[in-house]
Image: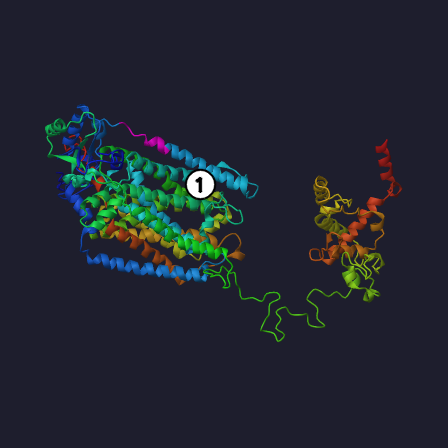
Amino acid sequence: MASISLGSYDNTKEIPGQRAPLVTGDNNYQTVTDQVCVLAEKPKVPPMYFVALGISIVWLIILKMCIVHLLLNGVGVWGNMSPVFWGWPIVNFVFWVGIGHAGTLISAILFLFRQNWRTGINRAAEAMTIFAVICAGLFPGIHIGRVWFAYFLFPLPNTMLLWPQFRSPLLWDVFAVSTYATVSLLFWYMGMIPDLATFRDRATSRVRQIVYGVLSLGWTGSARAWSRYEKAYLLLAALATPLVLSVHTIVSFDFAVSQLPGWHTTIFPPYFVAGAIFSGFAMVVTLLVPARKLCGLEDIITPRHLENMCKIILATGTIVGYAYAMEFFIAWYGGNPYEQFAFVNRAFGPYWWAYWTMVSCNVISPQFFWIKWCRTNPIFMVIICIFVNIGMWFERFVITVTSLSRDFLPSSWGYFTPTPIDVLMLIGSFGLFSTLFLLFCRFLPVVAMAEVKSIMPDAQHRDPDPKTAEI
Amino acid sequence: MSTDVEHQTAAEPQASPEPTLAGYVAQFDDVPSLMHAAEKTRDAGFKSFDCYTPFPVHGIDDAMGVKPTRLPFIVLGCAAVGATTALALQFLTNAWDYKYIISNKPFFSIPADMPVTFELTVLFSAFGALIGMLALNNLPRLYNRIFLVDPFQKVTTNGFFLGIESEDPKFHEADTKSFLTSLNPVSVTPCMEPHENAALPKLLAPLAVFLLVIGLIPLVLIARMRAMPSDVPRIEILTDMDFQPKAKTQKASPVFADGRTMRPVIAGTLARGDFYEDVAYSEGLQPEQAENVDRSMLLPNAKNPDGTTFNLTTVPWVTELPVEPTEDLMARGQARYNIYCAVCHGMTGKGDGLVSRRAMELQAGSPGIGTWIKPITLYDEPIRNQDVGQLFNTITHGVRKMPGYASQIPIQDRWAIVLYVRALQRAGSATIDQLPAEEQQRLQAEAN
């Protein structure tokens, strides 16, 4: 069947028929399936997998211990103190929600734009979204102090017959993030149904047959079912696209709807969304470069995929740099002395180190991707993407902490210092994230096999001339 | 191949245990040959047939003659339900049941309700898309007889199949098989419908009841524990600051020799701020006679030993203000009066304040229920004749229904109010000839 060799294809060619194929190597439907299933079916998993899982679980346990410590002693174990009541937990929340955005962007927006290269990476990116949103939801959840009263956030009449206040951006956040998590989960699961059926059909043990049989809901691959499935997928993509934009917009409202200098700006929604996509793609690259090695997916997640993501990182990173410049410009042009002070204070005040870390990681480091070598060398791109993630974490830190620590009244200024618990919890949340991701690699289809097959050359009934056919 | 197996066996419970033919499945090599076969089958007039592919093949629904799905309308309906739910939720909670007053903002405003409305619309639509898709496809199903066809496992890897069901009116065992063979498939396999006894195992119902009962026991125990009195204190997993290490009123304390938590005042001491040397200023009493006054008699509704109400006018009150009556003090007194007194006594002291008027109104609606007494007009003869000391005492301790205001109004302000009350009395009881000459002339001119 379909077998392609890389030959003289060139990724940068703009003529569609001469671009590098999305699945390289001598692959057909059977070998693609075999490659994707290998980590989930292999009786002997590479030892590197267990090393990675072990490290992740250690950090997960540290996170759990920190949470128990927090619950027993109260939120005073964090560095949050007057005037910075929004410290690291909120920074971590916004950071993780942002990470989640690339997954839905790849699945939904690139799907609507008919960007076929998304098929190799969308499953892993969606999984990343789910796990990042879990990490994000953790922080406001424990930030409320008495976690057992978290249900007060939901519109339930409590014992005082009091309802949540629907004009508060914090409540919008509850709806936005929980809707985002739910819709991403549905999208992820629906996309997986045909691939879970593949797992079911290939299963050799009774347990796997039953588990994947139940999860795949009796999928037969019927053309009538595929037709409805594709319509549902299209509709979900169309729904998820504005949802991606709305979630971080609403997260930015938490800041923008307040009156604090440095927060009360209309640039926040687009700027937050661009930053979220920026950090999300950086995280996808950081995860997929090792994952494609670990799972042996070099033929499916090709340098072309990675290069395309680097281009998006370059574009969104430049948007973020523009937003930084525009914030300064508007602070000056707006003529508000508090606003002007807030921005001068960000760059040259007590948190100058955080500001310049942010600028160098977010604005300068993605500019390397103008050079072709930088966006085709996996090791180098992972290093840049780690810098981008550090920078985007610092961006949230700078926004949250600098504005709060020095607002209108010099008499109420303060300096925020994190505690070791703050630091351990941030690293611990990475442990939670990577544990979930590694389990996903082991037990679920890492690549959307059905979608990858559908973009292979023989898959669709098209023009028989391969020179003009779109690949 | 998509009819429900339960449905068939329910219709004919006496079915033979032998499997019957449910259709034929033909396997093809690749997409073009399957597409071609689908067109042929459609043109041959078959309705109950389906193609099976490892990925969505575009254009095959046209080749098969499949109509467009109505899923978009289901999703649109869900979106409408989601938007309505969100708006109703926000209206009912924040504009009707519990109104949040925030900076005079409207209780129900569409712009502020938009984010939640948008989110719930998307949420409901997404569920509609997934559940609608599954429902239209008759999923989820844990069993499908087509899985029993031997090469069918390849369908999710690289198999392309076309199946025709026996329930199709055009189906004929031999003809259909030869028709499928004429399409040049790799193989044609019969799909058999196994018939087994579909009745539930006899033990299942009693087992289910037994498990249900077992499962209910913990709930019943919890319900009983919650409803019954108990000798042991409840288990507090999270105390939520219910218990705090602090000294409480009337509790014993091991710290002091007498075991009391509440400490009596040490003899010869006064609490800070409680001592004023000048009784005329602090209590409104004549300094030389104050020693003989029984202070408990100054409280409202004090009774003589014989049960009659104590007559406050007999107390040696000061008759002159113990403070300097200045313009500023008068203005202060007016402001304090308007804050604290005017709600009942009215701005002019006529006893027609808003609280009083509302209370009278309520009482008029339900006679015999209220106990509100209209405050006496401040420039009535008995009040006008009271000494300033007694007025001061009334503000301090209250009288009849009126509570004492000592904790709210500092001494200096109480005297300011007394001064202003005197002004009101003067204004309220004045006659026309006490006015200045030009005022008299102005009134005369107005009367004419």
Towards the viewer: B159 or B406: B159
Viewer can see residue B440 = yes
Q: Nearer the viewer, residue A115 or A73?
A: A73
Mark 1 highlights which residue?
B116
- What percent of the width, then of the height, locates residue B159? 16, 38
Q: Is residue B307 magenta?
A: no
Q: Quadrant of the N terminus of chain B?
A: top left
Figure coloring: rainbow
Q: Is residue B361 left or right of residue A161?
A: right
**Quadrant into which the C terminus of chain B falls:** top right
Q: Residues within 10 Å of mark 1 (few under 14, many from 20)?
A: many
Q: Could you tell me residue B339's position as x and y percent?
A: 70, 49
Task: Say what secondary structure mark 1 lies in.
Answer: helix
Residue at 24 percent across and 49 percent down: it is: A374
Res A262 seen here? no
Residue A295 at what x, y percent from top left? Answer: 20, 51
What is the three-letter code of the residue carrying label 1?
Val
In reply to whether residue B70 is colored magenta, the answer given is: yes
Q: Which residues are magenta?
A: B67-75
Residue B42, compared with residue B441, is above or below; it is: above
Give the residue at the far right of this rendering.
Answer: B433
Residue at left 84%, top 56%? B313
Of the pair A216 and A140, the residue shown nearer to us: A216
Percent across and percent down for residue B262 are 63, 68
